[in-house]
Amino acid sequence: NAGVTQTPKFQVLKTGQSMTLQCAQDMNHNSMYWYRQDPGMGLRLIYYSASEGTTDKGEVPNGYNVSRLNKREFSLRLESAAPSQTSVYFCASVLTGRYEQYFGPGTRLTVT
Amino acid sequence: GQQLNQSPQSMFIQEGEDVSMNCTSSSIFNTWLWYKQDPGEGPVLLIALYKAGELTSNGRLTAQFGITRKDSFLNISASIPSDVGIYFCAGHPPGTNAGKSTFGDGTTLTVKP
């Protein structure tokens, strides 16, 4: 079991460029989440998907879109990157009815 | 939304010392979880608490679910260098989607050999 995997690990973008962060889990979890982590600010929820076919906004959704491609995969898209989106992005998944989140290793994104 | 206050924000301790940190909320929570994030990695679950008053250990770590349901504590005994990292609490108020957690801002622990 690989658990939760994320690609890429590092990315540098110029302002205005677009990119998609990929996340996949092999634990048959129904719920998946995207967070961003900025220094001293903990984990802030961007979007989540409670089950395949559904997505909902979290605390900081502006500037992002998501796609729940299938049960395994949940991608995060930045359509027009801004320096304020420089952050570390984590994907997580949860088994239905449980509370414990399993996190990926993160994507470190810099927007110049 | 729900806010969790986690303290202290950072700690600098000597190897061998015990560590205490806590998390408080203005409203009640049904569950409390504690995660550790090693430098450059994603958070990993340490301890999960499901009942008020519950005390659970995982090796040198002990966590408690406060009886008021508004707080939780994490203690680390006899710290070692590999305890370095950020410790996050997370909780779930009644009525929330089971997997959707509210996270504290973290306690950054530095252990000096």
Image: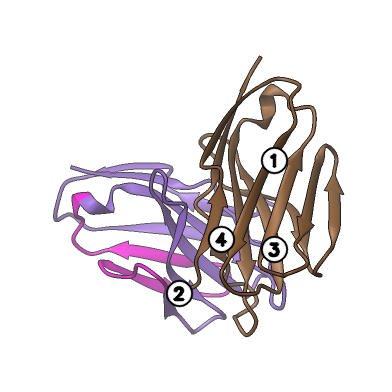
Chain colours: A purple, B brown
Give the secondary structure at mark 3.
strand
Q: Which residue is mark 2?
A: B1
Q: CA distance from mark 2 to mark 1?
A: 27 Å
Residue A23 in the image: state x and y as whole percent.
49, 59
Asked if the stretch drawn in magenta spans residue A70, the answer is: yes
Residue at position x 69%, y 71% in the image: A95
Near-viewer residue (A4 or A111): A111
Q: CA distance from mark 3 to mark 4?
A: 17 Å
The reply to whether discs 2 and 3 touch (Cβ–Cβ < 8 Å) is no
Q: Which residue is mark 3?
A: B32
Asked if the stretch drawn in magenta spans residue A63, the answer is: yes
Residue at position x 21%, y 56% in the image: A81
Highlighted range, magenta: A58-83
- Residue B20: assigned label: 1
Dot 1 amino acid type: Ser
The reply to whether discs 4 and 2 touch (Cβ–Cβ < 8 Å) is no
Give the secondary structure at mark 1.
strand
Residue at position x 66%, y 67% in the image: B70
Tag nearer the camera, 1 or 4: 1
A48 with respect to B78 (left or right): left
Q: Which residue is mark 4?
A: A92
Which quadrant holds residue B108?
top right
**Mark 3 and mark 4, same subunit?**
no
Mark 4 packing: few (<14 Cα in 10 Å), some, or many (20+)?
many
Subunit ID for the residue under disc 4 = A
A15 with respect to B102 (left or right): left
Residue A45 in the image: state x and y as whole percent.
45, 65
